[in-house]
Each structure stands twice: as structure tokens, then as C-alpha cells.
Amino acid sequence: MGGNGSVLVIGGTGGIGREVARHYHERGDDVIITGRDLERANEVASGIGTGVGTLAFDLSEPETIGEALSGVGAVSRLVLSSVSRDHNPIRNYTIADAVYGATMKLVGYTTTVHILIDRLGDDSSVVLFGGRAKDRPYPGSTTVTTVNGGVNSLIRTLAVELAPVRFNAIHPGIVGDSPFWENKPLDAVLQRTPTGRLVTMAEVVDATVFLLENRGVNGVNLAVDGGWMLL
Ligand SMILES: NC(=O)c1ccc[n+]([C@@H]2O[C@H](COP(=O)([O-])OP(=O)(O)OC[C@H]3O[C@@H](n4cnc5c(N)ncnc54)[C@H](OP(=O)(O)O)[C@@H]3O)[C@@H](O)[C@H]2O)c1
């Protein structure tokens, strides 16, 4: 079991967040998922099973997060997995897109933790989602690369300031069976992945659960990418 309190998955309406929520629901934990739209969150929740709680708010509007989370009680496991995918080449830099992307993960994730401080117990743990774009940029990835690089550092301050709560980050490579990549050409990624296959949502969930549950793991940035950086 996750411990005392609920398992709160911010971005639980998305591909990987939904699978993390499903894992904890199947283990009998109280699970709450969030997205931006309550109707969609309710649909996803009923697809997971009965009794999954839902909330809707936009991480890019951090001032609204406190009110949105006001009904949430103790939280034993917090997963921050929301993302906005900002394709923003420097030569055609769109400030509004960059501000949105940077705000939602870096300020939005941090504000969520800030709001929940008194609802996290000593045994609580938190996983933030970054991504391997922090190390492997591509044209247009500046916001994604720098934001995920920020997640890499953010867990360190959180783990120090809010000890003994544990904070870890997961940095997936291309998750081949996640909805975002459906029907997109991924041969180039495969060729650079030593395992010859793309990581799966199940593998990312497994690694997330490891970070959340293993009480010795704190302040760790864990890559789950089949060795993508080795080639
Ligand atoms: N999939 C991959 O291959 C991959 C690779 C590397 C890293 N990652 C990381 O893994 C995490 C999960 O990825 P995923 O592919 O599962 O994502 P996804 O399917 O695109 O889901 C994104 C989630 O974020 C929520 N969201 C989007 N904008 C938001 C906002 N402004 N405020 C609050 N919530 C918002 C979405 O909710 P609604 O749409 O319902 O509002 C949804 O729940 C992300 O942090 C991503 O960066 C994924």
C-alpha cells in the first residue's frame, strides 16, 4: 500500500499518469487524478475503476492550485506527470508558449508541493516527471529541454527543504506505447537505443513505483530509456 493518505496523480488523465493511478487503484489505495477538464478526468477515472477521485485545474495558472486542492486530505504519494509539449525553435521563438511550458512544470509542480506541505507526512514521497530531452535536445526542444533540466535540479531543493519527505525524478526516453507517440515514426530513436526496443509505459510505472516506495531512494534522477544516451 502507498501508506497513510491518498495517491494523488497530477496529470493522471494522461498516458503514463493514468497507468500509475491504475497501479495504485489496483493495490487498493485511494487515488485522485487530475487534468485540466473535470469531465475528461471523470471519464478516465471510470476507465480505471470505481472510487477514483478527480480534480481539474491548470498548472500554468499556479494561483489557482491552492483552491483546486483545498478538498484533498493527507497525501502519501504525489506524482507530478503533467506536460505541455512546446515545439519552440529559437529562430521563431514564441514567448507565450515558452512561458506556458516553463510555468506549468517548474512553477506549477513547485506550487503543488508548496500547497500540499502540511498534507505530506514523514513517510510520504513524491515523483516528478522530467524527460530525456534534458540530455538529448532536438530542434525546437529548448523549453522542453530546459524545463526537464530544471526538474533534474528541483528535486534536490525539495528533498533538502522538505526532509524527510523523499523527492525523486524520472526521466523517460521515448515511451513507445504512450498515446502521444502513437503512429509517429520512431525508427531513428530505435536505432540509437542499445536494447533495440523502446521503453514501455509499464516499465515507466514500475520505475515510478520503485522511486515512490523504496525508502532508501531520495534525490535521485532516474533515466528509463533503454540506454539511449550510450549510442
Ligand atoms: N510519453 C513519453 O514518451 C515521455 C517521454 C519523456 C518524458 N515524458 C514525461 O512523462 C510525463 C507523462 O507523459 P505522457 O506522455 O503520459 O503525457 P500525456 O499523455 O500527454 O498527458 C499529459 C497530462 O498532463 C495534463 N496537462 C497538460 N497540460 C496541463 C496543464 N496546463 N495543467 C495541468 N495538467 C496538464 C494532461 O491533462 P488533460 O489533457 O486531461 O488536461 C494529461 O493528464 C510528462 O511529464 C512527460 O514530459 C513522457
Image: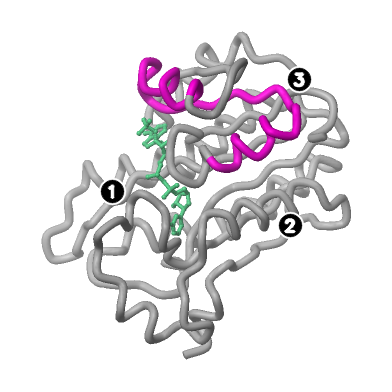
Quadrant of residue 220 in the image? Answer: bottom right
| Element at label 2 | loop
Earlier in the chain: of badge 3 and badge 1, it is: 3
Instruction: Give the residue number, with chain letter if any, for mark 3.
Output: 74
User: At 55% across and 42% down in the image, what residue appears?
Assistant: 19
Question: Residue 40's spot in the image, x, y percent?
Answer: 37, 22
Name the residue type under label 1.
Answer: Ala
Principal secondary structure, stretch drawn in magenta: helix
Inter-mark Cα distance, 3 to 1 = 33 Å
Residue occupied by mark 2: 219
Q: Nearer the viewer, residue 79 or 29?
A: 29
199 up-or-down from 101: above or below: below
Percent across and percent down for residue 115 are: 62, 23
Residue span colored magenta: 19-46
Task: Please tell me whether mark 3 or mark 1 is closer to you in this view.
Answer: 3
The quadrant of the image that shows the N terminus is top right
Q: Which residue is mark 1?
A: 98
Disc nearer the start of the sequence (2/1): 1
Picture quadrant of residue 71:
top right
Q: Residue at x 69, y 45 (%)?
A: 158
Give the side of residue 1 with respect to residue 26, left or right.
right
Compare marks 2 and 3 and give the one earlier in the sequence: 3
